[in-house]
Image (cartoon, rainbow, N blue to C red):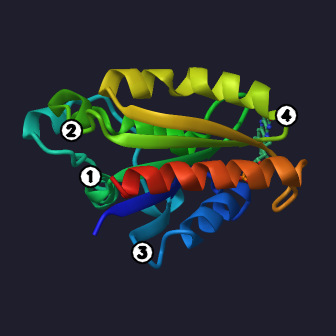
Amino acid sequence: MKKALFISGSARNGNCKEILESLQKDFWLEYSTEVIYLRDFDLTPCHGCKGCKKQNTYECVYPDKLDLLMGKVMDAEIVILATPSYFYNVSSLTKNFIDKTYPCYHHKLLKNKKFIYIYTGSDDPETTKKRLDACMWGFSACHGLNVLGSYAFSCTEEGEFHDENDKNSKLKEISALIRKYLNM
Ligand SMILES: Cc1cc2nc3c(=O)[nH]c(=O)nc-3n(C[C@H](O)[C@H](O)[C@H](O)COP(=O)(O)O)c2cc1C
């Protein structure tokens, strides 16, 4: 069964969680789906030791749950990665995840992997999208990911979306995009 993996890069149970759980509900009857939280994987920072490169796997030589996390990523047909905008950058949890995909870079394990990026931020969605797309560029380009789209939501406190119509129309659009690729 094809799998959609929803990854939250927020440390709190806030807007990334709400968006991902809402999207997951559209698919869980027909497809394998899972929402996971980067905070649960206790990822150590990348030490730049290149031990992962030497051992020819996507595990980190420093003990953490990277292998469990990457196993889920590799199994998924499509990965929906959500991050809050922090100082117009991705969250530290998200950046740490990106850094920890270093072994995949050497072995081209993520080449053509389908990703959708979701950003939450207080600012207007156009600004957030522009800033965060720039932050995600290196991850996408270095791995040769197949990025299907990126979507920014304007929101601040948990559950406080600034424009419900914009939120709902983006959720519909993302859902249709996921379905299109899961149906292929
Ligand atoms: C440390 C910190 C920095 C933030 N920086 C920005 C920012 O630069 N631009 C912005 O639009 N929102 C910023 N925000 C607001 C968050 O992006 C916003 O609350 C978002 O909804 C958080 O997502 P979450 O609910 O999934 O955690 C910041 C929030 C925090 C806590």
Q: For disc 4, does the CB lie below 8 Å from ligand 1?
A: yes
Amino acid carrying mark 2 in the image:
Leu
Separation of residues labelled 4 and 2 (CA atoms): 35 Å
| Residue 92 appears left or right of 12 | left
Mark linked to residue 180: none
28 vs 177, nearest the viewer? 177
Q: Are marks 3 and 2 in contact (CB under 8 Å)?
A: no
Mark linked to residue 109: 2
Lower position in the chain sequence, tag 1 or tag 3: 3
Amino acid carrying mark 3 in the image:
Glu
Amino acid carrying mark 1 in the image:
Met
**Disc 1 target residue:** 74
Q: For disc 2, does the CB lie below 8 Å from ligand 1?
A: no
Q: Is residue 92 above or below residue 39?
A: above
Which residue in the rendered view is the most extreme toward the bottom? 29
Lower position in the chain sequence, tag 4 or tag 1: 1
Q: Position of residue 91 (x, y in %)?
A: 61, 40
| Residue 47 appears left or right of 27 | left
Judging from the image, what secondary structure is the residue with disc 1 in? helix
Pointer 1 local density, CA inside 10 Å: few below 14, some 14–19, many at least 20: some
Q: Are marks 1 and 2 in contact (CB under 8 Å)?
A: yes
Pointer 2 local density, CA inside 10 Å: few below 14, some 14–19, many at least 20: some
Q: Position of residue 108 (x, y in %)?
A: 20, 31
Mark linked to residue 123: 4
| Residue 24 appears left or right of 143 | right
**Disc 3 target residue:** 30
Residue name at image x 45 percent, y 68 percent: 34
30 vs 37, nearest the viewer? 30
Lower position in the chain sequence, tag 4 or tag 2: 2
